[in-house]
Image (cartoon, rainbow, N blue to C red):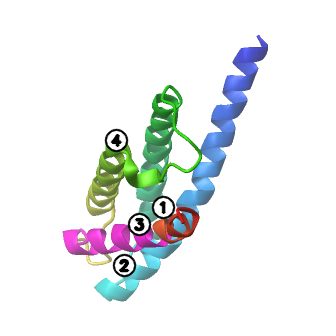
Amino acid sequence: MSSLLAISSSLVYLILADSVVALLLALICWGLLRWNTRCPVPFNRVYLACLLWALAASAVTLGLISLGGKQAVGPGHQLLASGWIRVAVLLDMLLGVALLWRLVPRGDGHRITLGNACLCVGVIAVLALIPLAGFSR
C-alpha cells in the first residue's frame, strides 16, 4: 500500500512540475510566435502543446535514467556523449515541432508555419542547453 502511495504521489509531483515547465515554455513560444507571425496566437493552445511536449519529454527522460542506471557511468561522464541521449534529444525536438505546428493556430484561422515551430523549439533547446554546457566542463 505504501508503494502505491509513493508511486501516485510521484506521478502527481511529476505532472505538477511538468505544468510549471510547460508554462515557462509556453510563455517563450507565445512571445516568439506573436513577434514572428505578427498576429494574435491563442495562449491556451500554445500551453497545451508545450504541456504535452513536457510530459513526453519527462517520460523519455525517466526511461533514459532507468536505462542508464544499469550502466556503470562515472561522475565525469558527459551528458551528450551517449548516442541514446542524442537520439532522444532529436526525437524530443521533432515532437515539439510537430505538436506546436499541429496544435497552434494563428488569429486568422491558419496554422503557424513549420518554420515558426522550428524557431520556437530551437530557441528553447538553446536556452535549455546553456546551463548544461556550464556543467559539462
- Rounded to the nearest angstrom, the CA distance separating label 3 from label 2 is 16 Å
Q: Earlier in the sequence, mark 4 or mark 1?
A: 1
- Rounded to the nearest angstrom, the CA distance separating label 2 from label 4 is 31 Å
Foreground residue among 30 and 107? 30
Local secondary structure at mark 2 = helix
- Rounded to the nearest angstrom, the CA distance separating label 1 from label 3 is 17 Å
Foreground residue among 59 and 29? 59
* Residue tagged 3: 125
Q: Amino acid at mark 4?
A: Trp
Q: Is residue 31 left or right of residue 18?
A: left
Q: Pinpoint residue 62: horizontal percent, then vertical percent.
A: 51, 36
Res. 26 in view: no
Q: Earlier in the sequence, mark 3 or mark 2?
A: 2
Classify the position of the N terminus by image quarter: top right
Question: Magenta includes 14?
Answer: no
Q: Amino acid at mark 2?
A: Leu
Q: Amino acid at mark 1?
A: Tyr
Foreground residue among 45 and 119? 119
On residue 84, the disc is 4
Q: Amino acid at mark 3?
A: Ala
Is there a contact, CB below 8 Å, between mark 1 and mark 3? Answer: no
* Residue tagged 1: 47
* Residue tagged 2: 33
Classify the position of the C terminus by image quarter: bottom right
Q: Pinpoint residue 34: horizontal percent, then vertical percent.
A: 39, 83
Q: Is residue 113 left or right of residue 58?
A: left
Q: Pinpoint residue 136: horizontal percent, then vertical percent.
A: 52, 62
Q: Earlier in the sequence, mark 4 or mark 3?
A: 4
Q: Is label 3 or label 2 in front?
A: 3
